Amino acid sequence: MKNYIGAIVLVVLMLAGCKGGNESYLDKKWEPVSLNNGQVSIESPFTMKTKDVSKEIASVKQYIKTFEMKISPESYNNFLILLSAVEYVDQITADYKNAADNAVKSAEKEGKMSNFVYTTADVTLDGKEGVEQTGTFKFGGKVFNFKQRLYGYKNKMVQILVASPEKDAAGATIMERVLKSLSIK
């Protein structure tokens, strides 16, 4: 089996003009968000939108059966949630550890974010092994906290990334609640 390092794992951050104010999300009714016919799900404080990734994956399409991504809408630009699920062709094993590092490197290379400082730890969810990156990055002169988790199993990989302004206590609470809601069947 071939390992796929995850060059198509995308970190699409739309944080321009961050204003804070995440407190309003704490008491809202949260919505279920799912990918792959309910195989991957989270709860979100807002309606997430589907991201068209066809251009990004065009050069590696022959290795992918399905790829779905949902992101927080631009109107919620003081908080980010990104959820993606990819199923590779059967001959490929998802390499989530390298994919996590490649996602950060890709984000830095794009030049929108900088100064990533993070730690990495192994995690497990629903019997699936994964890796979690916890840290900060700089965007538009502001520092953001982020957590990114990638899980790999067989020929599938799931990525979740949450980020909020550094000194936003409500944002930190939301990040943890979203991560805790993640389910992979």
Image (cartoon, rainbow, N blue to C red):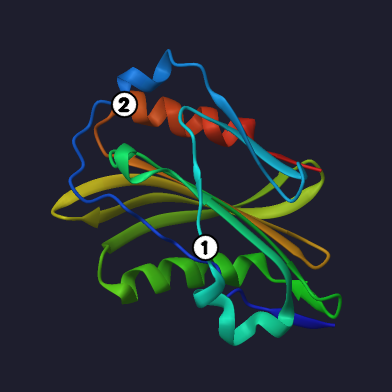
Please say if the residues under marks 1 and 2 sit with CB atoms less than 8 Å apart: no
Residue designated by label 1: 52
| Amino acid found under the numbered disc labelled 2 | Asn
Q: Is residue 31 above or below residue 28?
A: below
Q: Is residue 26 above or below residue 138?
A: above
- Spot occupied by residue 54 in the image (x, y as percentages of width and height): 56, 72
Give left or right: position of 67 versus 57. Answer: right
Which kind of residue does numbered mark 1 sit on?
Answer: Asp
Disc 1: CA contacts within 10 A as few (<14), some (14-19) or many (>=20): few
Q: In the image, is residue 92 above or below residue 119?
A: below
Kindly identify which numbered label has been placed on residue 78.
none
Residue drawn at the location 67% of the way across and 39% of the way down: 41
Q: Residue at x 32, y 70 (%)?
A: 108
Residue 127 at x, y percent in the picture: 82, 45
Q: Earlier in the sequence, mark 1 or mark 2?
A: 2
User: From mark 1 to mark 2, how far is it between C-alphas?
Assistant: 27 Å
Q: Quadrant of the C terminus?
A: top right
